[in-house]
C-alpha cells in the first residue's frame, strides 16, 4: 500500500506541455507512465471534477454547472467519503472555493484554501504549504489543486507565452514539494499522480467530434512502469484507481474500474474482500426487513 499525492492542474493541456520546459513532469513520465484522459461532457471544470472523484457521470451525480448550486446527489459517493469511512488521513490544499463541494463534513484532517485572486503566485504558495504539511503530517491522501495554468490561459490564451510560463511554474511547484519529501526520506512512500480534469475549453463534445486527451502522469511505489503510452483512460476510472493505490476496494456504486495496467499490486484480493462486505450488508438488510 502506498500513500498518494494527487496534483490537479486546472487547464493543463498535453500539447502545450510539449512546448514548455517541465523537468519535473518529464522525470515523472520517465519513471512511471503517461496516459491520456478522455474529456467528458459537459466540458466544465466543476462537473468533470465531481465525476473524477465520484466515478459517476454528471447526469448521475447531478452537478451540471460550475456553480454547484444543486449539490452532489445523495447516491454519489466521493473518494473522500470512502477514505473517511476507511479511517484514512486526508488533506486538501486548493484555491477554488467551489471544490469544497467534494468534501463531506469532517472528512478532512487538514484543509487549506487560499483565494487565487489574493496572491500573485498562488501555486507556489500552496506548494510551499503542501511540502511542509506532507513533511509533518504524512497524510495517506493529499489533494493539491493548482490554478495558475487555467488563470493564465483564460486571460492570455491557451498557447500564449504567459500560459507556457504558468505550466513551468506548476512544474517548479511540484518539484518543490518532492524536494520536501526527499529531505525527510518520504519520497519513496508516496505515489505521485499529476492530472488535468479540464483544459480550459467550454464547449461540449459529441462522439463524432475530435477531442484532445487530458494529461495523466503517475510514478511511485503504487504504479507499474508502462512503456505503452498511447492508451487513453476514462475519467471515471481514476477514483477506483486511486483507491487501489491506497490499498482499498472501490465503492460498489462507482461506474469506473481500476486501471489494472497502471497498478503494481494485484487487486483481485481486495475485490473479493469488498464483495464479502457487500454481501454481508445485503443479508443484514434482508434480516432487518423480515
Image (cartoon, rainbow, N blue to C red):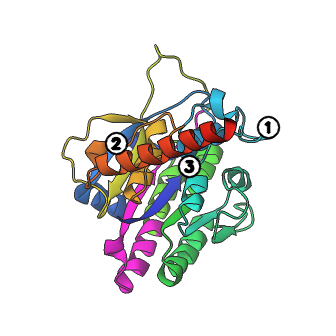
Q: Furthest-front residue in view?
A: 290
Q: Is residue 66 left or right of residue 269?
A: right
Residue 76: percent from left, percent from top: 64, 40
Q: Residues within 10 Å of mark 2 (few under 14, many from 20)?
A: some
Q: In what element is the residue under mark 2? A: loop
Question: Which label's residue is closer to the chain start, 1 or 2?
Answer: 1
Q: Does the magenta run of residues contain 209? A: no
Q: In what element is the residue under mark 3? A: loop
Q: Residues within 10 Å of mark 1 (few under 14, many from 20)?
A: few
- Out of 281 and 100, give the one closest to the viewer: 281
Q: Is residue 140 above or below residue 243?
A: below
What residue is shown with label 2? Answer: 259
Query: Can the viewer see residue 92?
Result: yes
- Out of 238 and 65, give the one closest to the viewer: 238
Q: In what element is the residue under mark 1? A: loop
Closer to viewer: mark 3 or mark 1: 1
Q: Are marks 3 and 1 in contact (CB under 8 Å)?
A: no
What residue is shown with label 1? Answer: 70
Closer to viewer: mark 2 or mark 3: 2
From mark 1 to mark 2, how far is it between C-alphas?
Answer: 31 Å
Residue 63: percent from left, percent from top: 70, 36
Quadrant of the drawing holding the C terminus = top right
Residue 147: percent from left, percent from top: 60, 55
Q: Does the magenta run of residues contain 175? A: yes
From mark 2 to mark 3, how far is it between C-alphas?
Answer: 22 Å
What residue is shown with label 3? Answer: 10
Amino acid at each position: 500500500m502506498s500513500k498518494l499525492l494527487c496534483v490537479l492542474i486546472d487547464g493543463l493541456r498535453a500539447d502545450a506541455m510539449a512546448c514548455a520546459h517541465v523537468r519535473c513532469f518529464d522525470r515523472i513520465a520517465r519513471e512511471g507512465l503517461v496516459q491520456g484522459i478522455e474529456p467528458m461532457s459537459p466540458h466544465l471544470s466543476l462537473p468533470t471534477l465531481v465525476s473524477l472523484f465520484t466515478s459517476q457521470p454528471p447526469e448521475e451525480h447531478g452537478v451540471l454547472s460550475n456553480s454547484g448550486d444543486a449539490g452532489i446527489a445523495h447516491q454519489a459517493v466521493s473518494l473522500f467519503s470512502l477514505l473517511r469511512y476507511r479511517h484514512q488521513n486526508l488533506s486538501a490544499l486548493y484555491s477554488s472555493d467551489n471544490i469544497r463541494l467534494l468534501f463531506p463534513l469532517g472528512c478532512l484532517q487538514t484543509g487549506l484554501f487560499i483565494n487565487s485572486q489574493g496572491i500573485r503566485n498562488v501555486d507556489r504558495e500552496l506548494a510551499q504549504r503542501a511540502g511542509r504539511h506532507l513533511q509533518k503530517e504524512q497524510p495517506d491522501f493529499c489533494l493539491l489543486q493548482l490554478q495558475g495554468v487555467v488563470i493564465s490561459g483564460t486571460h492570455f490564451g491557451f498557447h500564449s507565452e504567459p500560459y507556457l510560463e504558468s505550466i513551468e511554474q506548476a512544474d517548479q511547484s511540484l518539484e518543490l514539494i518532492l524536494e520536501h519529501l526527499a529531505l525527510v526520506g518520504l519520497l519513496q512512500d508516496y505515489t505521485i499522480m499529476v492530472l488535468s480534469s479540464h483544459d480550459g475549453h467550454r464547449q461540449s463534445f459529441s462522439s463524432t467530434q475530435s477531442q484532445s486527451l487530458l494529461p495523466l502522469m503517475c510514478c511511485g511505489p503504487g504504479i507499474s512502469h508502462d512503456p505503452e503510452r498511447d492508451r487513453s483512460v476514462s475519467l471515471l476510472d481514476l477514483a477506483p484507481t486511486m483507491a487501489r493505490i491506497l490499498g482499498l476496494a472501490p465503492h460498489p456504486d462507482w461506474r469506473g474500474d481500476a486501471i489494472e495496467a497502471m497498478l503494481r499490486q494485484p487487486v483481485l484480493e481486495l475485490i473479493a474482500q469488498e464483495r464479502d462486505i457487500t454481501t454481508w450488508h445485503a443479508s443484514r438488510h434482508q434480516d432487518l426487513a423480515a
